[in-house]
Image (spheres, rainbow, N blue to C red):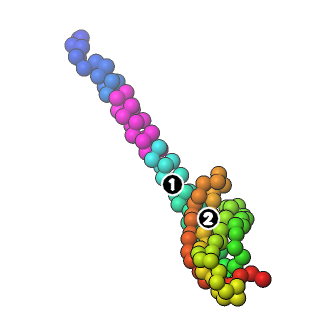
């Protein structure tokens, strides 16, 4: 006996192809968002490391009350570069007296972009 042919012939294959296409779109979106998350986490870790190093560096400056004016730079142990700028806030009236200075400490990433910029004022003596 012959069975009548169904009008749904091939429909299951079409549904499967559409389901696979939708699944691949969803998986590519998940992959992209995961990649962005990993990159963002890396940037946050780099900025946190830069901030920690800069705060420690700034805290160690002028421990003895003496800080030379001008611009200096260097590299931290983890490869991040830094630049320190010390400038007077006012004209020095008495060379023996302490003087207020403006301190700017910048930490840079490996490509030269600024990660952290700390600014503060301190009262220091002139370096002998």
Q: Mark on residue 40? A: 1
- Pinpoint residue 76: horizontal percent, then vertical percent: 70, 66
Query: Dot 2 lies on which element?
Result: strand
Query: Dot 1 lies on which element?
Result: helix
Instruction: List the single residue furthest toward the front.
Output: 93
Q: Can residue 65 be seen in this view?
A: no
| Left or right relative to 64: residue 122 | left
Query: Which stretch is magenta?
Result: 17-31
Q: Which of 10 and 6 is in front in this view?
A: 10
Residue at image x 67%, y 82%?
62
Q: Main secondary structure of the magenta part?
A: helix
Residue at image x 42%, y 41%?
29
Q: Can residue 68 be seen in this view?
A: yes
Q: Which of marks 2 and 1 is in front?
A: 2
Above/below status of 115 relative to 10: below
Q: Mark on residue 10? A: none
Above/below status of 54 relative to 44: below
Residue at image x 68%, y 61%?
81
> To which residue does mark 2 refer?
106
Residue at image x 67%, y 61%?
80
Instruction: List the single residue furthest toward the right.
Output: 128
């Amino acid at each position: 006996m012959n069975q009548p042919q169904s009008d749904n012939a091939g429909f299951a294959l079409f549904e499967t192809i559409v389901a696979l296409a939708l699944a691949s779109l969803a998986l590519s979106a998940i992959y992209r968002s995961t990649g962005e998350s990993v990159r963002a986490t890396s940037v946050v870790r780099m900025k946190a490391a830069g901030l920690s190093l800069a705060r420690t560096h700034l805290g160690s400056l002028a421990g003895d009350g003496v800080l030379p004016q001008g611009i200096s730079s260097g590299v931290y142990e983890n490869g991040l570069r830094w630049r320190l700028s010390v400038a007077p806030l006012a004209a020095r009236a008495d060379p023996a007296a302490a003087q207020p200075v403006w301190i700017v400490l910048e930490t840079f990433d490996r490509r030269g972009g600024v990660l952290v910029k700390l600014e503060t004022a301190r009262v220091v003596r002139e370096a002998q």
